[in-house]
Amino acid sequence: MSGSIAISGPFTHADNSVSRTMQMVMLALVPATLFDLWLFGWPAIFLFGLTILFCLLIEAGCLMLAKRPVLPALKDGSAILSGWLIAMSLPPWAPWWIALLGAVFAIALAKQVFGGLGQNLFNPAMVARVALLISFPLQMTQFAAPHPLFTAHAPDILTGLKITLGCEGNLDSLSAASALGHIKTELTRGIPVTRTVQTLPGLKDMLLGIKPGSMGETSAIFILLGGLFLMWRRIISWHIPVSMLLTLFLLGSLFSAINPARFASGLIELLSGASMLGAFFIATDYVTSPVSKKGQVIFGFGVGFLTWIIRSFAGYPEGVAFAVLLMNATTPIIDHYSRPRVFGRTRQGQPVAFGDKK
């Protein structure tokens, strides 16, 4: 009609955005991160800050090379979150160059090479974790025993800086194996799991995280609370975390019941390693996980199954990062075969005839 004004339809508007989602995820990580920074002291604090800084610098450098706007990309929080998750997956007393290489692997190779945020096939933080573990197994498996900040045996700020810069070389007396690493090592010596678990921290310490490991492998209870917060805020759904953790728990419980000398229990599988971090903060990545709920359940089952297989039979004591990357590669296939039927069409994409209930 002449003179009429075209207006948009009554579409629903949501306040979700990339930056808001990143902020919610980081907020959920705050309790576990603060606890772990306190638990491992100044070296962990320096490493955490450097990892995030390196990720921001490499993101900015890649964007400048590609002649793309820098500030808008840095403000969305994705590079900060990637650095945050990388730091959570590193030994807390690792040297600075491990953080730098991790940032290069994650941001330059796993993210920007594919075109940037939203176009990467693999989870950047897990690409960094796996690449570093394969390339530098000694540095990536040298965990510090907990030395809480401001306690008698904790390194002071200067010593912490020296550890991060690699200037403090005598760390053997301070290092310890993670729970899964200890179980794996003792098995190679012929010592059954039933004996090894007696030397592991108690259930309370495993829940709180008073044990050696990366920051993402310690405070299970705080990571769980952060994950539940994300579910409550509807940033993530229950499908991937529950299917992954349930699969891991059932497999551990079943095989432990069959052969307790060879396999760890389901509870140890849940509370050790990066099970909680992987379930709530890694496997649920929007870009690298399936879209449909059915697909997410399949994905979570696959991550849990592969994690247990790698932990139980492979050379590495931890398998979450490998499992996530393997399942990332299957995400397009899972999406293809699990996509919901479009209203008015069959599952093959053909129009539904009137009265057809297929």
Image (cartoon, rainbow, N blue to C red):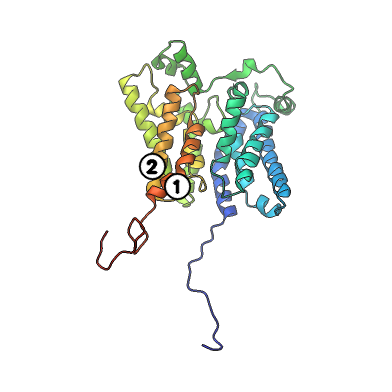
Q: Determine whether the residue tagged by mark 2 lies in a helix, strand or loop.
A: helix
Q: Residue furthest bottom?
A: 2
* Residue 347 in the figure: left or right of residue 4: left
Tag 2 residue: 298
In percent of the image, x 38 and y 40: which residue is there?
243
User: Residue 35's image quarter?
Assistant: top right
* Residue 85 in the figure: left or right of residue 265: right
Q: Nearer the viewer, residue 114 or 292?
A: 114
> Can residue 90 be spotted in the picture?
no
In percent of the image, x 71 and y 46: which residue is there?
60
Q: Nearer the viewer, residue 239 or 6?
A: 6
**Mark positioned earlier in the residue sequence (1 or 2):** 1
Q: Residue furthest top?
A: 190
* Residue 214 in the figure: left or right of residue 95: left
Tag 1 residue: 290
Q: Position of residue 291 (x, y in %)?
A: 44, 50
* Residue 92 in the figure: left or right of residue 160: left
Vertically, is 7 above or below 257?
below
> Can residue 60 be spotted in the picture?
yes
Q: Position of residue 217 (x, y in %)?
A: 52, 31
Q: Amino acid at mark 1?
A: Pro
Asked if disc 1 and disc 2 are in contact, CB closer than 8 Å, the reply is: yes
Q: Quadrant of the C terminus?
A: bottom left
For label 2, count other residues whose C-alpha is less than 10 Å away and answer few (under 14), some (14-19) or many (20+).
many
User: Residue 155's image quarter?
Assistant: top right
